Every structure is written in structure tokens, then in C-alpha cells.
């Protein structure tokens, strides 16, 4: 996506983060020179690169970040076609997740190809103010492994702002106990700590910094 940006606008735009582990990179050209930006997932060593289209003065372009940041540092270059590659780098070590910044902004400025400079800054999505929506438990099915029976639990993720899922299990008529904490966007779990002849009941809820959702519906199986 490319769109014109007034050259005097220096306010960092708030950009929507992508899915978990896939933030955005915006390159903004505040210089008077057309350039081709390249973003690197690290500051030294062999790097994965992400190349942007030729960017005219006063324009910006946003892409989904394709690679995790390696070594707590990322870098960028901007080819002008006539005067080499003005470059810059920035540390991500102070971020909550140095490998997965939500938004990366690369800004080029300067007059003339020989005076170009660039700077990299980061911003994060605001913390959630409400707990996530409750997941929906879809299936509880029996499988088999070399070590014995396995129960597979699957659910629908009904939220986009959870940081974890908490899965609980009840054995027979007992009380629910938490058996697993899973990362965001998880939708399944295999429970191998089960025995034949026993009834198991499962439920799951989603959590973030604002709290946890209501529990899902329950699902039971007798092995």
C-alpha cells in the first residue's frame, strides 16, 4: 500500500498490528530523493531481507513483517541508485518481545542523495482494557499413542487480543484443575495423562493483561 504523505508531517502514525508474531514495517520517505528501502532482520551476520517498492518523496509504504528480529537488533538501508546505501539500525532489547515488535517505523530524511539519513523507531499496541471473548469448545475425541490413550481437545478462538489459553480438566465427579497454559492463537491440545475407564471433562478460557474470559462450554469423554 502506498499513499502520499505531506513532507511536513512528522507525527508517527498508529498502525494496526498483524497477527501474533507478524507486526508491520512502515517506511516513510521525508527526504527529497526517491529511494528503494530494504529492511534486515538483524544488525550483523547473514540476514533475511524485506525489500520495498521504489518510494518517492512524501510517500510511505507498509508491509507485514515477514521475519522475527534476531539478536535484539534490526537495520535498514535505502538505495538511491546513484549514491550508495544510507543505513541505520536500532536495538529492540528494551521491548517486551525483542524478537516480535508490533510496529517498526523507518524514516528517511535529508536533502540530496549525499545527505540522506534514516532512523528506526518502534511502537506497541495499547494494552487491552477488557478480557478476551470466551472460546467455544468444539470437540473432545480419543486417540492412541505408543504410550496409551490420548484425548484431543479442540476449540474455536473467538478473540484477537488474548495472550494465553488456560485449559482445565475434571476427572470423574471431581473439581476442575488447570492442566495447560497455551500461547495465543492456540486451538488444540493433546492430553496424554489419561487412563482407560475414566471420564474426563474439559473447559478452556482465554486470558490477557486485563483478565480472563468466561469459561467455554464443557466437553466430556469416557475412555
Image (tube, helix red, strand yellow):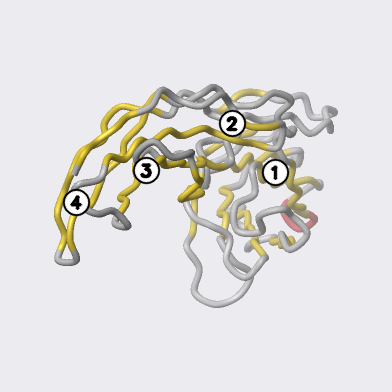
| Residue where numbered disc 1 is placed | 105
First in residue order: circle 4 vs circle 1: 1
Q: Is residue 171 shown above or below 70?
A: above
Residue 53 seen in the figure: no
SS for callout 1: strand
Mark number displayed over residue 197: none
Circle 4 residues within 10 Å: few <14, some 14–19, many ≥20: few
Camera-near label (3 vs 2) is 3
Circle 2 residues within 10 Å: few <14, some 14–19, many ≥20: many
Mark number displayed over residue 196: 4
Horizontal side of residue 160 vs 14, given as left or right = left
89 and 203: which is toward the camera: 203
Camera-near label (1 vs 2) is 2
First in residue order: circle 2 vs circle 4: 2
| Residue where numbered disc 2 is placed | 161
- Separation (CA) of disc 1 from disc 2: 22 Å
Where residue 31 sits, quadrant-wise, is top right
- Separation (CA) of disc 3 from disc 1: 51 Å
First in residue order: circle 3 vs circle 1: 1
Q: Residue at (79%, 29%) from the top-left corner? A: 7
First in residue order: circle 4 vs circle 3: 3
First in residue order: circle 1 vs circle 2: 1
- Separation (CA) of disc 4 from disc 3: 12 Å
| Residue where numbered disc 3 is placed | 171
User: Residue 14, position in %: x, y?
Assistant: 72, 29
SS for callout 2: loop
Camera-near label (2 vs 4) is 4
Amino acid at each position: 500500500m502506498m499513499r502520499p504523505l505531506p513532507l511536513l508531517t512528522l507525527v508517527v502514525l498508529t498502525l494496526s498490528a498483524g497477527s501474533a508474531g507478524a507486526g508491520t514495517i512502515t517506511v516513510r520517505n521525508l527526504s527529497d530523493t526517491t529511494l528503494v528501502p530494504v529492511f534486515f532482520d538483524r544488525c550483523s551476520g547473514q540476514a533475511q531481507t524485506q525489500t520495498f517498492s521504489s518510494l518517492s518523496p512524501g510517500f510511505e509504504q507498509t508491509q507485514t513483517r515477514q521475519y522475527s528480529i534476531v539478536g535484539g537488533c534490526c537495520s535498514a538501508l535505502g538505495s538511491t541508485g546513484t549514491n550508495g546505501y544510507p543505513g541505520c539500525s536500532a536495538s529492540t532489547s528494551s521491548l517486551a518481545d525483542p524478537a516480535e515488535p508490533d510496529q517498526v517505523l523507518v524514516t528517511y530524511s535529508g536533502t540530496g542523495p549525499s545527505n540522506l539519513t534514516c532512523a528506526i523507531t518502534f511502537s506497541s499496541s495499547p494494552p487491552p482494557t477488557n478480557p478476551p471473548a470466551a472460546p467455544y469448545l468444539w470437540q473432545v475425541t480419543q486417540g492412541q499413542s505408543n504410550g496409551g490413550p490420548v484425548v484431543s481437545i479442540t476449540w474455536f478462538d473467538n478473540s484477537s487480543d488474548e495472550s494465553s489459553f488456560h485449559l482445565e480438566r475434571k476427572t470423574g465427579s471431581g473439581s476442575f484443575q488447570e492442566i495447560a497454559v497455551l500461547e495465543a492463537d492456540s486451538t488444540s491440545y493433546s492430553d496424554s495423562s489419561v487412563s482407560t475407564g475414566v471420564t474426563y471433562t474439559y473447559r478452556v478460557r482465554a486470558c490477557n493483561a486485563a483478565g480472563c474470559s468466561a469459561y467455554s462450554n464443557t466437553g466430556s469423554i469416557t475412555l
